[in-house]
Image (tube, rainbow, N blue to C red):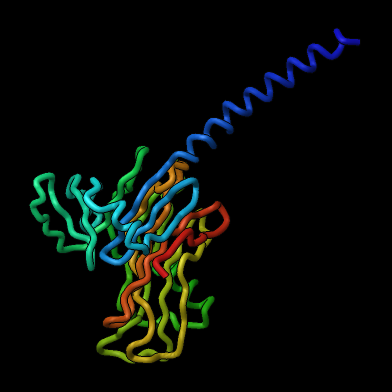
């Protein structure tokens, strides 16, 4: 009887060890992953123990002060610098000389390798998917835009580029649309996946103008997350959102609200 079960027990042990090596060690590694991301002046997030946390307390900011970050301006790397937060984030070199950042700043630090994808904004020359989105939301294809561009990035690292579109008619200066709208969507295998969609009756100062800030593998899962910012009128500020794609839809992991 015992001899009959020995091979089965050995197989079960081998399977158990293999599963632990494949998944258990990876899970333990991920428990130790930590990163901090700064978007502009008003948004700071921490990834710790596989959870995203919004930095809001004085103690949390203090923990990040004078720490070394990889600093980007308008999606181009500026260098490794120290950050310090007061009313906003300030950037300094190792001798505490101020570094001037005039464009859109994004900075991160982590205890593991993070990759960021370069991308460029291109004019939309084929309106096929744009018109589909407008039609699906009962909007005219003749609408004018205040923001309109696309970019292509392989967010799931499968060797194929996904197309991302940003269109909006928020804050028009020389026309008055019946409806105001903003959309950010991805096209993959001819299917449209929405990240951000908003339609409302026209009011001069209403709405939020979206912009893709970066593509970044922020938690080392070999899939890129997206940071999308939505700019509101005047002193109403901006909404920063970190999205991921699970293969079926986009989900906001964390925002600054």
- Which residue is painted at 53% across and 76% down in the image? 136
User: Percent x, y for residue 16?
Assistant: 68, 25
Residue 95 appears at what percent x and percent y? 9, 46
Of the pair 236 and 175, the residue shown nearer to us: 236
Residue at the right extreme of this rendering: 1
Q: So how many labels did they put on this image?
A: 0
Up the image or down, 27 lies above or below 187; here it is above
Q: Quadrant of the C terminus?
A: bottom left
Q: Quadrant of residue 168?
A: bottom left
Q: Does residue 214 lie above or below 112 as drawn?
A: below
Q: Locate residue 84 relative to residue 166 in the image: left or right.
A: left
In the rendered image, which quarter is residue 74 located in? bottom left
Residue at the spot 45% in from the left edge and 46% down from the top edge:
223
| Residue 157 appears in the rendering | no
Q: Residue furthest front?
A: 59
Horizontally, is 240 left or right of 1 in the view?
A: left
Residue 252 point in image, percent of width and height: 48, 62
Indicate the quadrant containing the N terminus: top left, top right, bottom left or bottom right.
top right
In this rendering, position of residue 76 left or right of residue 3? left
The residue located at (29%, 65%) in the rendering is: 123
Q: Position of residue 149 (x, y in %)?
A: 32, 66
**Residue 211 can be seen in this image:** yes
Q: Residue at x 54, y 37 (%)?
A: 27
- Please state if 147 lies on the left or on the right of 247 as rendered: left
Residue 109 lies, with reference to residue 112, above or below; the image says below
Of the pair 106 and 174, the residue shown nearer to us? 106
Foreground residue, 210 or 130? Answer: 210
């Amino acid at each position: 009887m015992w001899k009959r079960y020995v091979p089965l027990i050995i197989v079960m042990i081998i399977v158990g060890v293999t599963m632990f090596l494949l998944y258990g060690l990876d899970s333990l590694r991920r428990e130790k992953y930590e990163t901090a991301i700064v978007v502009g002046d008003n948004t700071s997030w921490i990834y710790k123990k596989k959870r995203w946390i919004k930095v809001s307390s004085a103690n949390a900011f203090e923990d990040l002060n004078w720490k070394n970050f990889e600093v980007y301006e308008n999606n181009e790397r500026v260098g490794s610098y120290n950050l310090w937060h007061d009313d906003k984030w300030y950037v300094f070199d190792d001798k505490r000389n101020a570094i001037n950042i005039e464009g859109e700043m994004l900075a991160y630090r982590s205890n593991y390798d993070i990759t960021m994808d370069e991308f460029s904004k291109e004019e939309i020359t084929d309106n096929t998917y744009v018109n589909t989105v407008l039609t699906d939301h009962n909007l005219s294809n003749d609408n004018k835009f205040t923001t309109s561009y696309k970019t292509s990035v392989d967010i799931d690292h499968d060797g194929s580029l996904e197309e991302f579109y940003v269109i909006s008619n928020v804050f028009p200066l020389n026309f008055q649309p019946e409806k105001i709208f903003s959309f950010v969507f991805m096209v993959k295998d001819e299917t449209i996946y929405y990240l951000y969609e908003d339609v409302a009756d026209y009011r001069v100062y209403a709405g939020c103008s979206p912009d893709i800030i970066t593509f970044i593998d922020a938690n080392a899962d070999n899939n890129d997350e997206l940071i999308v910012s939505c700019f509101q009128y005047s002193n109403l500020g901006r909404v920063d959102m970190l999205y991921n794609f699970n293969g079926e839809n986009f989900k906001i992991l964390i925002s600054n609200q």
